[in-house]
Image (tube, helix red, strand yellow):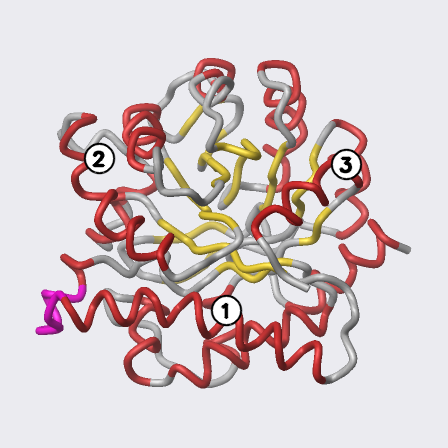
Amino acid sequence: MTGTNTLTAALGRGTVVLDGGLSNQLAAGGHDLSDRLWSARLLADRPEAVAEAHLAYFEAGADVAITASYQATFEGFAERGIRHDRAAELLALSVRLAREAAGRAHAKGVTRPLWVAASAGPYGAMLADGSEYRGRYGLSVAELERFHRPRLEVLAAAGPDVLALETVPDTDEAAALLRAVRGLGVPAWLSYSVAGDRTRAGQPLDQAFALAADADEIIAIGVNCCAPEDVDAAVETAARVTDKPVVVYPNSGETWDADARTWNGHSTFTPQQVTGWRESGARLIGGCCRVGPDTIAGIAGALKG
């Protein structure tokens, strides 16, 4: 009940529910994510915990699990003394764990199709210094492409249904990712992190979305890891600029303090918001940081009830 082509077809038929924040689900289970590798550390140390987190979202109503590879890079693993071949195994493991969770969900009575999205976070995620919310790393498009391509090749070879090019802060990195996914044989979505009507680096969203308008590999374009209040305008802009389905999965509404490594504020994301996003063109809808299974269950109920 999985398969690359069927996810693309499903977007033409209706709305697909994404999961929520993997890190907050792991933290709720008592796992320490203070390491620079964040949730990717558990691929090596506690892979069973990653599978359990995916299963919780499938049981809550998610149709897609996004893998624990957001912060998983060859460079980041090397800093922990993990060799290149072992890092490649861990990247592939992230896809396999999500696929295993889908199988367990089906065995427990979930009958709908379930899919796996292999996460590829921005260059700033590897730096683990908050620069994924700023962009502008001082690297060229070619340099960013060389950074992203090797791990995308490994993730694609592991057999996900789609590649999630997510939390992209600026158009230079988007251009690099669009080049890096060419020829991999796996579709992808491209999702920007935004503030208001601009990317985190300050580019207008219509220009940012237009980059992917003619990219055959991209099956959806949109935003994630942003405030829920920023989603409405982003969906309308993406639907206007491209004819692709729109993907949206904002944070809870709390804000991340990169220096203190803590969340501040309170949640402003409610399941009731998602029906308006769907009406404006969103076809992949879920949550990002601080959005847990209860909220995903509410989203699934609102969209499918």
Sequence-wise first label, 2 or 1: 1
The residue under label 3 is: 278
**Percent position (x, y) of residue 141?**
20, 26
Q: In this view, does 8 lie above or below 114?
A: above
Amino acid type, label 2: Glu
Q: What element carries label 1?
A: helix
Sequence-wise first label, 3 or 1: 1
User: 23 and 180: which one is in front?
Assistant: 180
Q: Is mark 3 on a helix, strand or loop?
A: helix
Q: Residues within 10 Å of mark 2 (few under 14, many from 20)?
A: many
What is the spatial separation of the Cα atoms under label 2 and label 1, in whole angstroms?
30 Å
**Percent position (x, y) of residue 217?**
46, 32
Query: Which residue extends farthest right?
Result: 305
Position of residue 5 in the picture relative to residue 186 (left or right): right
Residue drawn at x 51%, y 19% is 213
Q: Give the range drawn in magenta.
A: 77-84
Q: Is mark 2 on a helix, strand or loop?
A: helix
Q: Say whether residue 210 is visible.
A: yes
In this rendering, the label closer to the viewer, 2 or 1: 2
Q: Do the residues labelled 3 and 2 touch (CB within 8 Å)?
A: no
**Percent position (x, y) of residue 17?**
69, 53
Q: Say whether residue 166 is visible.
A: no
The residue under label 1 is: 24
The residue under label 2 is: 145
Q: In which quarter of the image is the C terminus?
A: bottom right
User: 81 and 5: which one is in front?
Assistant: 5
Sequence-wise first label, 3 or 2: 2
**Which disc, if any, is residue 231?**
none
Q: Do the residues labelled 2 and 1 touch (CB within 8 Å)?
A: no
Would you say residue 28 sits in the magenta stretch?
no
